[in-house]
Image: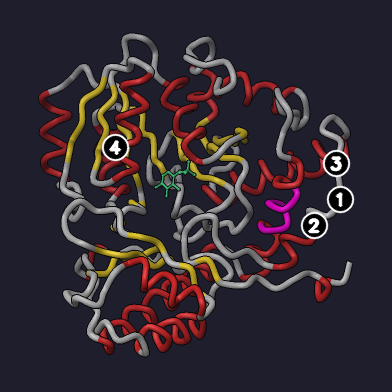
Amino acid sequence: MDNKLLPDNPYLLLTPGPLSTSKTVKAVMLRDWCTWDDDYNLNIVQEIRQRLVKLATSAFDEYSSVLIQGSGTFGVESVLGSALAPASKLLIIANGAYGSRMVQIAQVLNIPHLVYDLPEVNAPDIDEVRQLLEENPDITHLAVVHCETTTGILNPIKEITTLAKKYNKITIVDAMSSFGGIPIDAKEWQIDFLISSANKCIQGVPGFSFIIARKERLEECKGRARSLSLDLYDQWITMEKGGGKWRFTSPTHVVRAFLQALHELEDEGGIEKRYERYSKNQKTLLEGMRKIGIEPLLPDSLHSPIITSFLSPNSEAYSFKKLYDLLKQNGFVIYPGKVTQGDTFRIGNIGEVYPDDMEKLTEAISKIKFW
Ligand SMILES: *Cc1c(COP(=O)(O)O)cnc(C)c1O
């Protein structure tokens, strides 16, 4: 298939995610796969599982990976619902919508939990985390979001997870919007369960989430699941013993596209290089916006290179809908704000997106008469 025959996207998705993917990622979805054939399981699923572990840690013999059907939240729910025994207790650090979603999951699944609840513009305070761990010795697990996509804040997870390990806690990290775009070493950072999904920084299409976890932690999940389809242990052991087999129908096209996306990540030079590109994208975006007089919600020191929240202008002429429609006509789709403190909008810069796209975007914004 000649990729030139594939249609161009009418606009760039600056909305992680789904995000803009390459034509080559989309092109490999133009054939069908049999879910129980070796061509699919051994050659695609197993290769993906091994590559994921190698991207997550240099100690790849101590970790394994599991793929789960559904969006990122399914992966988070699978881990929370399978990793905690009935008598376990979870400390959740929440400074945004995705931290709050973990709280919701704990409520629905009846998991005993404690929330360290913070305003969306605040990073967790390591001394306060220590105090919570000191005061609540019944806590067994700690869960935290790496990049809170709500604002774009980058939480200091390494400090938090290494602290949690000093207190012998099991650590769970929602690295949904950072894994593949920001270097992480799961072993060095003392992470037991790391969760991400196909349609974020690996630059695949939506359809499954994945968990990279310490093997002994996965073993402990046996018999603990609070759901059949989200049973992390059962999904893992079926993939391990069945040579890449999924328990239920897998999103075969999405999985094939994901392998292509992993090859393209390698071709780009790996996570370090992708991190450099995303950082350059975000820097170009911030500089361009500041020239127009648009300021970000967060101080630069708290920012991730993934997504940025900007303060909406104080002008009568402004509405998010108008901004959205005008930018869409110019080839860019952006995100509404999600914070409770103040009126904002968000621009993501991950995916098949480059610094000159950010220049074109800020040029288009500068022509709009809200500022
Ligand atoms: C995208 C995302 C999720 C998962 O959201 P889904 O809509 O289920 O894909 C979870 N946590 C974070 C930080 C995210 O960015």
Residue ID for mark 1: 31
Left or right, 100 with respect to 239, comes to: left
The percent coordinates of residue 179 (x first, y second) are: 48, 52
Q: CA distance from mark 3 to mark 2?
A: 11 Å
Q: CA distance from mark 1 to mark 2?
A: 7 Å
Choose the circle earlier in sequence order: 3 or 2. Answer: 2
* Up-down relation of residue 122 to residue 195 (above or below): below
Amino acid tagged 4: Ser
* Up-down relation of residue 129 to residue 226 (above or below): below
* Up-down relation of residue 36 to residue 311 (above or below): above
Residue ID for mark 4: 100
Task: Residue 28: give its label.
Answer: 2
Q: Are marks 1 and 3 in contact (CB under 8 Å)?
A: yes
Task: Residue 33: give its label.
Answer: 3
Tell me: is circle 1 under 8 Å from ligand 1: no
- Magenta part of the protein: which range? 256-261
Tell me: is circle 2 under 8 Å from ligand 1: no
- Report crowding for label 2: few under 14, some 14 to 19, many 20 or more residues within 10 A (C-alpha): some
Amino acid tagged 2: Val
Q: CA distance from mark 3 to mark 4?
A: 37 Å
The percent coordinates of residue 30 (x first, y second) are: 83, 55
Q: Secondary structure at mark 1?
A: loop
Q: Residue at image x 45%, y 42%? A: 187
Q: Are marks 1 and 2 in contact (CB under 8 Å)?
A: yes
Q: Are marks 3 and 2 in contact (CB under 8 Å)?
A: no
Q: Residue at image x 34%, y 44%? A: 145
Left or right, 168 with respect to 116, comes to: right
Dominant SS of magenta comes to helix
Q: Residue at image x 66%, y 56%? A: 262
